[in-house]
Amino acid sequence: MYPSRGSRRGFTLVELLVVITIIAILIALLLPAVQAAREAARRSQCTNNLKQIGLALLNYEQANKVLPPGMISGVATNSITYPYDIRGEALGTSAGNHGTSWMLRIMPFIEGDVISKVWASGKNNTTQGFWSPVSNAGTGPTSATFGPAVMDIKGFYCPTRRSQIRTQDQPLLPNRDRTGASWNWPGGGTDYGGCAGRHGHAENSNPYRIRTADDATAISSYYTPTGQYAVPGEPTTLTVIKRVGIFGRINVATTIAEIRDGTSNTIMTGEMQRLTTETAIPSSSYGQDGWSVGGVATLFCTSYHGGNSALPLINNRTALAPGSEHSGGAHFGMGDGSVHFIQDTIDKNIFCLLGSMADKISAQLNPY
């Protein structure tokens, strides 16, 4: 007998498996392209974030004739130009306190007027830190006393890494004192920071602190800390003031005129490494987080490799160095407001010198 007219022959199992295999191959070929397209979009957004931060800084400079200080501190070993103290302790009681960051200063220029006003008028006033009363220092705040410091700001997060504080980022927040006491901050992180220069920047121990511009005692006592890259041919006695970057001084604001190496050849901002373990050297330098926190949370230097000279100066897993979750490098904003992706294979001499603003040594960035 012959098949009736109009009858259909179904797929055999072999044919079906062939079709499935072809579809799987096509998906496998397409998936990397889709992922690459998504990462390209994320990189574009990351670039835009840094452009907006750079624009806010330049607008701040137009309004104030100076850029904001890298860190504001009121500790006893520093000149008390601004009486902010992030820990909420009485001013001058501890030389290891963090002050507030430069990012807090630009809030009015990135549509953060409300945050700026709440900070200035509420519990976070000019005589106290993030919480009140001062006597709570060392015991930790309650959830009601955090204030605007824990607000997640979308433009401060790199979309490749995160869109808000994640569980794995909680240990990075400034939620503890040196004894490890937890304060459990719920948010307020940042993936971007300012360039302190090519020296160990404003942190807890004296060799890493830049104070007032005329502090001759502090300047003469500085040395090149262990774990930093040194440009060949430079004198080992080079004063740290020559290594200073735009945000390299506590309580001191940088003017555009001070950027003598040229704004297009000086790094102003960049992406921060967010370390889930404390791998930094020295041990007092935590891989902290938090856009309003001065110090290692919002500053990086362009010369730190943590004692391993074979490591690059970008993405080297040390808290004082910049880095990102992008493959092969990180984005950096220059003093003129431009943003460039710099590969972590960049010549160390060039990258190191791009961090300082007035060392009179020629270094020019060739965009990648």
Image: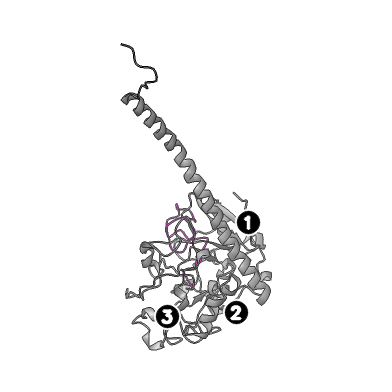
Q: Decide which of 152, 311 is in the foreground and name it.
A: 152
With respect to residue 180, does 78 lie above or below?
A: below
Residue at image mark 1 = 363
Q: Name the amino acid type tagged 2.
A: Asp
Q: Quadrant of residue 357?
A: bottom right
Q: Quadrant of residue 27?
A: top left
At numbered mark 3, what does the secondary structure look like: helix, strand or loop? loop
Q: Is residue 295 magenta?
A: yes
Q: Name the amino acid type tagged 3.
A: Arg
Per the rendered image, the range of residues in magenta is: 294-322
Say how many tags the image has.
3
Disc 1 crowd, CA 10 A, few/some/many (<14, 14-19, 20+): some
Residue at image mark 2 = 214
At numbered mark 1, what does the secondary structure look like: helix, strand or loop? loop
Q: Which mark is residue 87?
A: 3
Residue occupying the point 55% across, 81% down? 117
Image quarter where the N terminus lies is top left
Mark-to-mark CA distance, 1 and 2 = 27 Å
* Residue 94 visible at all: yes
Nearer the camera: disc 3 or disc 2: 3
With respect to residue 261, does 251 lie above or below?
A: below
